[in-house]
Image: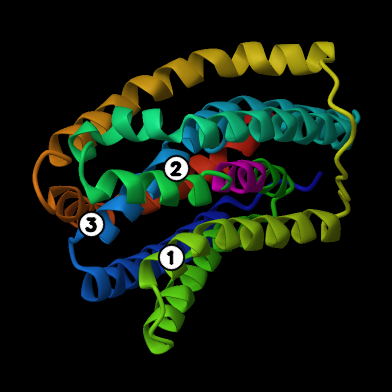
Amino acid sequence: MRPIRLLPAFLTVGGWTMLSRILGLARDVLMAALLGAGPVAQAFLIAFTLPNMFRRFFAEGAFNIAFVPMFAKRLEAGEDAAGFARDALSNLGAFLIVFTLVGIMAMPWLVLAMASGFHGDIRFELSVTHGRIAFPYIVFISLTALLSGVLNALGRFALAAAAPILMNLVMIAFLLIGYWTGGNIGLWQIWSVPVAGIAQLALVWWGVGRAGFPIRPVRPRLTPEMRRLAVVAAPAMLAGGVVQINLLVGRQVGSFFDGAVAWLSYADRLYQLPLGVVGLAIGVVLLPDLARR
């Protein structure tokens, strides 16, 4: 494996991440203009928060922290890194499909856990309906994160860093289509979530194939390597759960005040715009590089 050129990699990831943040801001401005802070906007934000909260357990957080170093070490040692990635993809995918089905059936209770102040008004029913549409996003975005980890370990940072841009572009397009056609903008918006997830997954899957790692799902197997991966990921999952308590508390409190969920979300997105770009770029680039040493 050729060594990772750190400075160009930092600039690549940071540049694409900043562009994604700018498009995300444009998406939120458009959403605020079209939906304001009404029941539909609040229902969407709760429905979209649920899969994004869980993905930090299964994808960008705990799982990838464990997966990327283990994959990079096998890659450096000339072991069967592709087989390891294939097993990880298959096991994670199988687990997430079951988890998603359970989540869809339990959606009323998940909404209550996130926004109990919605109970008894139209926001609750909207959140349950929207949540069931959006929840499969967790499958697509988690597998996207795993394949992005493969690309990062291979030193192919651009495609993985650019994938989130697709989500913002798809969501902006669906909002505009809903507005221009005079349709139900809320439904257009919520259906953009799984479509964006599929688009992101397709992009990085294609990129992994072009990088010489054509990964195909296989029958899930609980091999010793997969057990070790689960053991390594477990503490990070626990730590990630603690971090999500802040999000849960904020949504719960906001749900008891009309429009507060939307205003809190818009303010948080604006606050987060400049944050994390440099830190994210450094973390994404250094993780596979340090794992080889």
The Cα atoms of the two marked residues, 3 and 1, are separated by: 13 Å
Q: Is residue 61 above or below residue 49?
A: above
Q: Secondary structure at mark 2?
A: helix
Q: Is residue 15 above or below residue 144?
A: below
Inspect the image, locate mark 1, and give the three-letter code of the amino acid beneath it.
Leu
Tell me where residue 255 appears, x and y as whole percent.
Answer: 17, 40
> In this figure, which residue is indicated by the disc labeled 3?
39
- Based on the picture, tell me whether residue 144 belongs to the magenta stretch: yes
The Cα atoms of the two marked residues, 1 and 2, are separated by: 19 Å
Q: Secondary structure at mark 3?
A: helix
Inspect the image, locate mark 2, and give the three-letter code of the amino acid beneath it.
Asn
Look at 44% across and 35% down and name the residue there.
107
Tell me where residue 131 appears, x and y as whole percent.
Answer: 44, 46
Look at 22% across and 75% down and name the residue there.
33
**Residue in the foreground of this view, choosing between 230 and 118:** 118
> In this figure, which residue is indicated by the disc labeled 2?
52
Can see residue 274?
no
Q: Marks 1 and 3: in contact by CB < 8 Å?
A: no
